Amino acid sequence: MSVDELHPGPDGFFGIRFESIGGLGAHLAGQMLGEAGVLRQGLNGSHFSSYGSEKKGTPVKSFVRFCAPDRAIRTNSPVETPQVVAVFHEALAKSMDLTAGLVPDGVLVVNTSTTPDETRERFHLRSGTVATVDALGIAVEEKTRVNTAMLGAVVRFCPFIDPGLMRDQIRDTFSRRHPEVVEANIRTFDRGYAEVEQTTVRAEGVTPSPPVRAQPSFGYLQAPIGGAILEPANSIAKDMSGSRQGFIPALDLDKCVHCGLCDIVCPDLCLVWEEEPTDDGGFAVKLRGIDYRFCKGCRKCVDDCPTGALTEIREEEGWADANTVPLYPALETAGAR
């Protein structure tokens, strides 16, 4: 099947946009997809990614364009009206419109454990196809990353990409540096392709939300009061879920011996300690909980906990808010007044 048979956009290209955070492998997934289409199937195509400080947890966008071999690609601009949007990290929806520019009959692929209908409601998609795959769960079971599972789901909705040739590309890519994970990533790809679920809605007269373009830096006329940074994980919103990679530490106080090793390795000082009086008139410092508003989910505390009081769990919507212990309770009280 050719790209032209899939009715590419008015610009003549079939566009794919990956929405992710650093550490989940979206850039590599886009690179492998582009190479499979161009080098193995003879399509014209291009790939590039957009990211900032290259740190884990920071937003990443990866773009892939395909077109027929007789058409030239003379642009490296972001894909603003994609046919497919793949969301590697659903918490990003809290801070940005991930479906911006998606064509009305396009496909939204989301890494989530919720159903397609629930996901469609959450992303407010009025027309098109919503596909869900538990890429994180697959990656954990196969001991890989979510990128190859998401790649499998995306290829499912790009019929002009041969899954067999995509497997060959994955095999070649990982064989260069990490041959020991080749077969695990092939399994991850196959499961992402096979385990995707979908729902489709069609509505007349629906126009996509406008593409989101980078805006100039704040000037003195439009800067937020006090220079506040109105993004997740800032001092105002205190929401780190968009930077965590799907897992957080959970504390079982019954197993805790208050040794403090977790606090030594925590880079974010999100562990909450309190002084307690002792029978001899002194005091003891004991761990009371975790303020998840400052936790970026690195789980170094889990690695160093000698008693198993701190364990790694998959983050579910609302769990962190329900289980957080305020790091500065006096400020919470002052804010309430």
Image (tube, helix red, strand yellow):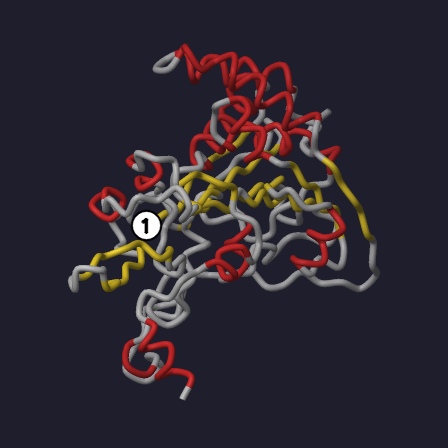
* Residue 265 x %, y %: 23, 43
Point 59% across, 58% down: residue: 100
The total number of labels drawn is 1
- Give the left or right position of residue 5, taking residue 19 as reference: right
Work out whether residue 60 can be spotted.
no
Per the image, label 1 sits on a secondary structure element best described as loop
Quadrant location of the C terminus in the rendered image: bottom left
Residue drawn at the location 64% of the way across and 53% of the way down: 102
- Residue at 58% x, 42% y is 86
Quadrant of the image occupied by residue 4: top right
In the image, what residue type sits under mark 1?
Answer: Gly
Of residues 208 and 20, the one drawn nearer to the viewer in this rendering: 20
Residue 10: x, y in percent?
Answer: 66, 49
Is 129 rendered above or below residue 183?
Answer: below
Q: Position of residue 216 (x, y in %)?
A: 35, 68
Which residue is label 1 attached to?
52
Residue extending furthest toward the front: 280
For this rendering, which residue is in front, 118 or 80?
Answer: 118
- On the image, the x and y values in percent for residue 236 come to 37, 72
